[in-house]
Image (cartoon, grey):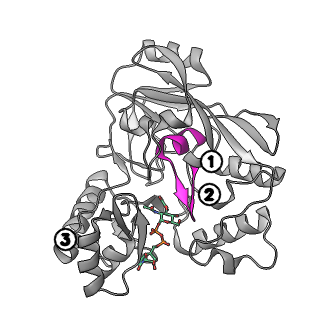
Amino acid sequence: MSVLIPNTLGLEARTDNYFEYAGEGELAACLANAPKPWLPVGAGSNLLFSKPQFEGSVFRCTDTSWETSFGSGYVRVRVGAGMRWDDFVRLCVDNGWYGAENLSLIPGDVGAAAVQNIGAYGAEAGNLVSSVEVYDTEEGLSRVFFPDECEYDYRSSIFKKSGKRYFVLKVVFKLSLIPAFRLEYGNLRAMVEGEPTLQKVRDAVIATRQSKLPDPEVIGSAGSFFMNPVVSREQFEALKAAYPEMPSYPAAGGVKLSAGWLIDRAGCKEMSVGDAAVYEKHALIIVNRGHASGGDVLQLASEIIEKVESAFGVRLRPEVETV
Ligand code: EPU
């Protein structure tokens, strides 16, 4: 039976082989009969389907359970990969657990958050991870990755780099019971009135996101379409001399530039291909205004890449994964 594959870009994408699993046993049973390639999905918030039919098998984890264990000054929360990421953040905020609040309202599931190392407002999911329990589809057994094995980097991890070898079953997060906030990013501090609390920070992050990012329930998008590029210090100095107002951030191996700013200044804000368009409030986002195809989105993305490269000599790389 043909099933629509969830994806926040709102692209028409179907599969004849759709499986849901709650744990290792069910997953192993599904895999035994599943045609390859195998694609694990959460909410599909970082996926671009290039064709209307996916010739392979799609798997979704339905485990939304959670359990806690407390230590001195911290709590470990073991969460099923299928819990919505923002439900997890709300759970933390409601219980007085510190660390996840800056990551409020990011679309997607917990499993994908651990693969993608989602980040916002100076925080990254990888920094909260205590361990990741996966099913290794090559070896046919489950295993645990500890933080020093996860290879967390900007929007990257060993899970992302290993193709679709590892399917996340559970993620264990470590959160602080001792109040600590990260408010240095952008105008976050100014948006929190008086003494910060978890709820006030969550509300401020939600208000900021809602003011510039499209609500995937209303208009299709995959969040930031491109990663913020890291360039050499020499290239940065040359660009900064020409564009003194250009935003930049320190980064390992060079200087991180703002892809949104580069796309905006390269004059891409009005660009569209079919129903795929640059979002008017944030140039880093490609939206589906109605019936865009995966091909429309890919063509628009490649036109943006070319325009930015010819204006600034910087080649953007998509954050979104094409399948
Ligand atoms: N900017 C423009 N024009 C635009 C958009 C942005 O000039 O059209 C400028 C802004 O004025 C600002 C700079 O670009 O000076 C950076 O913009 P912003 O603060 O919105 O952050 P970003 O670097 O574009 C990143 C993440 C977002 C995350 C925000 C907040 C990436 C690829 N994106 O965006 O994550 O929410 O920081 O922390 O790292 C996502 O990954 O899907 C995502 C939404």
Q: Position of residue 208 (x, y in %)?
A: 61, 73
**Which mark lies nearer to you, 2 or 1?**
2
Please name the residue that numbered disc 3 is placed on. Answer: 313
Please name the residue that numbered disc 2 is placed on. Answer: 103
Residue type, numbered disc 1: Trp
Q: In this view, does 237 lie to the left or right of 129?
A: left
Q: Element type at marker 2?
A: helix
Residue 289 visible (yes or no) = no
Inspect the magenta stretch and tell me whether residue 123 lies in it. Answer: yes
Q: Element type at marker 1?
A: helix
**Contact? badges 2 and 1 (CB < 8 Å):** yes
Name the residue at 25% across, 68% down.
Answer: 304
Residue type, numbered disc 3: Gly
Q: Where is residue 279 in the image (x, y as percent from the top left)?
A: 41, 72
The magenta-colored residue range is 110-125
- Distance from label 3 to label 1 (Cα)? 36 Å
Quadrant in the picture for residue 64: top right
